[in-house]
Image: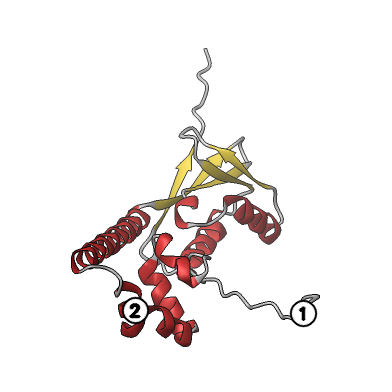
């Protein structure tokens, strides 16, 4: 309660774009926000997006302006759908590379690259690998300038399995996890 006896109003934030639902239209994910709002807060959804609410919001507009606003809304929704589709295609065409690199005769490291495309934080994943496999794991930049997780030890099979399970949890089971092996070139004696 405030000092003057009034209580604070609870503010609801969107689970998709994190704006208050009244401002979701400015976030670029309006369709997803509407779906979330309809499931989580149907009363607020009706207040904002029912036929009556939309008619009331547009009653002051002339017929031409109303048509223009509707066209703009349709364009934004089409752009949003295209963006989401492109993002999904990019994710599905990308792959995670688990590379086994030989350091010396018996020592190996595993380098995992390509996880940041799928919304996985490489630093958190490196920490998980370090504790799960009881080895050292760090995040470095590879030659392409992208983040790469380097795990000490020959734990390639376990890493591949863990990454595959992690992607399946995120609903990306069509993503390819590729295994490669990198051997250092032998120095010629002579």
Residue 4 horizontal side relative to residue 113, left or right: right
The residue that appears at 34% across and 79% down in the rendered structure is 56
Residue 87 horizontal side relative to residue 43, left or right: left
Residue found at the far top of this picture: 190
Residue placed most toward the observer, 168 or 43: 43
Q: Position of residue 190 (x, y in %)?
A: 52, 12
Q: Which residue is mark 2?
A: 56
Can you say whether 49 is above or below 140 in the image?
below
Q: Position of residue 156 (x, y in %)?
A: 54, 53
Can you say whether 57 is above or below 120 in the image?
below
Label 1 secondary element? loop
Residue placed most toward the observer, 175 or 24: 24
Label whose residue precedes the other's in the sequence (2 or 1): 1
* Quarter of the picture holding the N terminus: bottom right
Q: Which residue is mark 1?
A: 1
The residue that appears at 20% across and 66% down in the rendered structure is 67
Q: Closer to us: mark 2 or mark 1?
A: 2
Q: Position of residue 125 (x, y in %)?
A: 60, 56
Residue 29 horizontal side relative to residue 139, left or right: left
Can you say whether 82 is above or below 190 in the image?
below
Residue found at the far right of this picture: 3
The residue that appears at 24% across and 60% down in the rendered structure is 75
Say few, some or many: other residues with alpha carbon within 10 Å of mark 1 (under 14 / 14 to 19 / 20 or more). Answer: few
């Amino acid at each position: 309660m405030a000092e003057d006896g009034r209580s604070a109003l609870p503010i609801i934030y969107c689970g998709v774009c994190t704006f208050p639902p009244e401002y979701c239209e400015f976030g670029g994910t309006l369709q997803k926000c509407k779906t979330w709002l309809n499931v989580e807060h149907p009363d607020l959804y009706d207040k904002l997006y029912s036929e009556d609410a939309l008619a009331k919001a547009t009653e002051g507009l002339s017929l031409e302006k109303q048509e223009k606003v509707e066209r703009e809304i349709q364009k934004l929704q089409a752009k949003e759908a295209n963006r989401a589709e492109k993002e999904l295609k990019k994710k599905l065409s990308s792959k995670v590379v688990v590379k086994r690199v030989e350091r010396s005769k018996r020592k190996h490291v595993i380098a995992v690259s390509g996880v940041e495309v799928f919304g996985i934080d490489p630093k958190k994943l490196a920490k998980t690998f370090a504790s799960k496999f009881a080895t050292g794991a760090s995040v470095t930049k590879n030659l392409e300038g992208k983040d790469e997780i380097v795990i000490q030890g020959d734990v390639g099979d376990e890493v591949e399995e863990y990454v595959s399970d992690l992607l399946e949890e995120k609903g990306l089971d069509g993503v390819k996890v590729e295994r490669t092996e990198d051997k250092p070139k032998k120095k010629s004696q002579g």
